[in-house]
């Protein structure tokens, strides 16, 4: 006698998972994400926005420990974001980590009038009362009376060419505890290498490193960041250089994080000066050495 085939056990129902809930942090402002066009007006998240959100979160992971370290030393926390643009980073940091910290304030520094005004309007609309926006270049902000004398954390993400160096000058002038840089368009050093190329051929065989134009550009970019790291170390900063994983769409993917220790690296200034002399870049001494 043929036995009846046992009926298949029904598959358990899969619980509905909200892909948005998996990405967002507890208490995160949906309205902010809509205003920043990370979410659509009906609260949806497309693939491009998902990637952008993950990138911002990834950068925030590097900055969050710095935000936690400063209040351990004092009651206030001042952060200046240079080349703020639409202030994605500033708004996200405030919303995720600083809106409940009464002593925290974020300053966004940007040269485009429309973006500064839009950021001011958005901060007012969302009740982000401890965010201010300054229409100024990075260099101008060093002496701006609207900024406090001391800034704890300085960020400059894709500040173009020498604007990153100005951000370093700003951080040194404001005695910043932490500096977070993603340099961009490092053209100045490459320009000086190119300017003295023929003279350098007779001075050092190292000039072969930048003989071809593409190598001049790439070597100049790499060298710029090496000089910046030595500059920071000469001023008592401990420097970490890493790849900003998750921003693969950007060729400028180098992240420099510097923390003030008060103990300058003994030979940093000497090494910096030797490199400038060896590579025929003495005219840049004022930028990278400056007042010690």
Image (cartoon, rainbow, N blue to C red):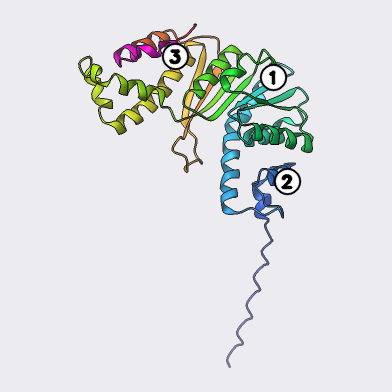
Numbered circle sitting on residue 199: none
Q: In the drawing, does residue 120 fall left or right of residue 186?
A: right
- Tell me what residue is drawn at x 62 percent, y 34 percent: 89
Query: To which residue does mark 2 refer?
Result: 30
Query: To which residue does mark 1 refer?
Result: 72
Report if residue 195 is visible in the image.
yes
Magenta span contains residue 69: no
Question: Which quarter of the figure has residue 119?
Answer: top right
Give the SS element for disc 3. Answer: helix
Numbered circle sitting on residue 288: 3
- Tell me what residue is drawn at x 69 percent, y 42 percent: 25
**In the rendering, at what x and y percent does residue 36 appear?**
66, 43
Q: Which residues are magenta?
A: 275-286
Callout 3 environment at 10 Å: few (<14), some (14 to 19), or many (20+)?
many
Q: Residue furthest bottom?
A: 1
Mark nearer the N terminus (2 vs 3): 2
Determine whether 188 is above or below 117 in the image. above
Compute the Cα span from label 1 to label 3.
32 Å
């Amino acid at each position: 006698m043929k036995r009846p085939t046992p009926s298949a056990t029904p598959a358990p129902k899969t619980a509905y998972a909200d892909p948005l809930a998996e990405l967002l942090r507890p208490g995160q402002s949906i309205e902010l994400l809509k205003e920043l066009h990370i979410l659509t007006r009906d609260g949806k998240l497309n693939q491009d926005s998902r990637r952008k959100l993950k990138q911002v979160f990834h950068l925030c992971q590097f900055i969050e420990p710095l935000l936690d370290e400063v209040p351990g030393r004092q009651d206030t926390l001042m952060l200046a974001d240079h080349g703020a643009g639409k202030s994605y980073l500033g708004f996200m940091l405030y919303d995720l980590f600083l809106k409940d910290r009464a002593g925290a304030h974020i300053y966004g520094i940007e040269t485009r009038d429309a973006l500064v005004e839009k950021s001011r309007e958005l901060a007012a609309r969302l009740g982000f009362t401890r965010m201010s926006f300054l229409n100024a270049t990075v260099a101008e902000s060093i002496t701006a009376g609207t900024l406090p004398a001391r800034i704890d954390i300085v960020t400059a993400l894709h500040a173009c060419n020498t604007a990153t160096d100005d951000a370093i000058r700003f951080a040194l002038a404001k005695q910043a505890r932490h500096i977070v840089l993603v340099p961009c368009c490092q053209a100045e050093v490459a320009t000086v290498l190119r300017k003295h190329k023929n003279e350098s051929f007779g001075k050092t065989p190292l000039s072969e490193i930048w003989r071809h134009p593409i190598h001049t550009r790439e070597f100049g970019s790499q060298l710029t960041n090496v000089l910046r790291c030595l500059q920071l170390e000469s001023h008592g900063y401990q420097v970490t250089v890493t790849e900003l994983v998750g921003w693969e769409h950007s060729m400028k993917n180098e992240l420099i994080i510097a923390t003030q220790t008060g103990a300058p690296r003994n030979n940093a200034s000497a090494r910096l000066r030797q490199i400038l002399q060896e590579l025929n870049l003495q005219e840049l001494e004022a930028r990278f050495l400056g007042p010690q």
